[in-house]
Image (tube, rainbow, N blue to C red):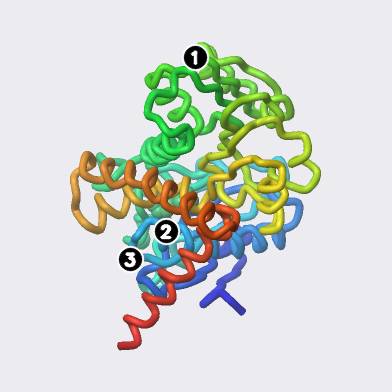
Amino acid sequence: MEHERIIIERGKRSGLPIIVAVHSTALGQAIGGCRLAAYADWRDGLTDALRLSAAMTDKCALAGLPNGGGKTVVALAPGRTLDGRDRRDALHDVADVIASLGGTYATGPDMGTGPDDMATIAERTPYAFCRPVTSGGSGDSSEATAVGVLACLQTLCAESDLSNRTFAILGLGRVGAHLLGLLHEAGAQQVVVSDVDETRRAVADKYGATWTTPQACLTADVDVLIPAATGGLLTPDSVPTLRCAAIAGPANNQLDQPATAGLLHDRGILWAPDIVVSAGGIVHATAVELHHETSAEATARVRAIGGTLAEILRTARATGTTPAEAARARARNVVARGRGELAR
Ligand code: PHE
């Protein structure tokens, strides 16, 4: 068993499966968002929580944070959404589980949740990042996540001028939409975008991006494909259909399994590991809320993610491994060193 602690319970108020997985506290308090999503079976939500919390451990280690990895999943039945009283009940159920962990784990926003939800959780436990600025939190982390992704795109393109590059953003949720705005500001002329939610098309129109279907976006002939929706999109089936030169995006767990990194490598597609690229949100939130930095100082830290990616790509080239393996090896090293220090 790799995880330190897994709590699964039927929420007292909501009756919903509440899953909190604490993967590691070797470097410090475990952190990781609260995902409110639909699953065919709640056990699929458990699988997601296990994988996502393990990825958070690596993400924190690579970002140089004194934190470990965890994740919360509230598993909804397919097609179900949660509003009003039901939403509050589910979030309070989450809060009680987090409170029972006594500060070893703190949550934050993730797919399906945002700053207001963190404020609701914070009614019952202090361990929630990214409450709205007006309630004393660091606010929405999606903009910082997008800044981190942009820094990685600049590393991949080996220049800060992105105006001659082409991009495909798969998913225009909070992070994807911010990123589209940043690419627009950076002068990018050719951006293809998609989202399963048709109403997001307005965001594409605002920035003059080309709206297409998720399938066409995934296989677009572009310099960089940017996964910004659910994970698991890179599979033995999808990799042969890709026409991008590189992939870098904020979606968590983009590979269906570790071996898929090898398939990308064999096809000559440069995959920037998601555990590096997606760290902007946690870097910003912890810098502001735990280390009391200003938002500007925190954002400078977020930009440094581009430098970390450059180092990992260099190591991968020098040792003849994939960026995925180089990133994981580096993360494992950091955690092992942390464990040693704790033992002393
Ligand atoms: N969704 C964020 C991530 O996957 C989780 C998070 C953000 C946790 C901000 C804490 C603070 O990295």
For the C terminus, which image quadrant?
Answer: bottom left
Instruction: Specify the amino acid type for callout 3.
Output: Pro
Judged by depth in the image, the label closer to the viewer, 3 or 1, is 1
Instruction: Specify the amino acid type for callout 1.
Output: Gln
Q: Is residue 153 left or right of residue 37?
A: left
Q: Is residue 38 left or right of residue 271?
A: right
Residue 235 picture location, percent across and down: 74, 47
Q: Tag 1, which secondary structure? A: loop
Residue 110 picture location, percent across and down: 49, 47
Disc 2 marks which residue?
62
**Of marks 3 and 1, which one's residue comes earlier in the chain?**
3
Instruction: Specify the amino acid type for callout 2.
Output: Leu
Q: CA distance from mark 3 to mark 1?
A: 39 Å
Residue visible at 44% across and 18% down? 163
Q: Tag 3, which secondary structure? A: loop
Disc 1 marks which residue?
189
Q: CA distance from mark 2 to mark 1?
A: 32 Å
Residue visible at 35% across and 61% down? 127
Q: Which mark is residue 78?
A: none
User: How packed is label 2: few (under 14 Cα within 10 Å), some, or many (20 or more)?
Assistant: many
Residue visible at 42% across and 23% down? 181
Front-lying residue, 186 or 326: 326
User: Can the viewer see residue 171 in this picture?
Assistant: no
Compared with 8, 42 (above or below) is above
Marks 3 and 2: in contact by CB < 8 Å? no
User: How packed is label 1: few (under 14 Cα within 10 Å), some, or many (20 or more)?
Assistant: some
Q: Is residue 80 left or right of residue 206?
A: right
Quadrant of the rendered image containing residue 269: top right
Front-lying residue, 186 or 291: 186
Disc 3 marks which residue?
66
**Of marks 2 and 1, which one's residue comes earlier in the chain?**
2
User: Can the viewer see residue 67 in this picture?
Assistant: yes
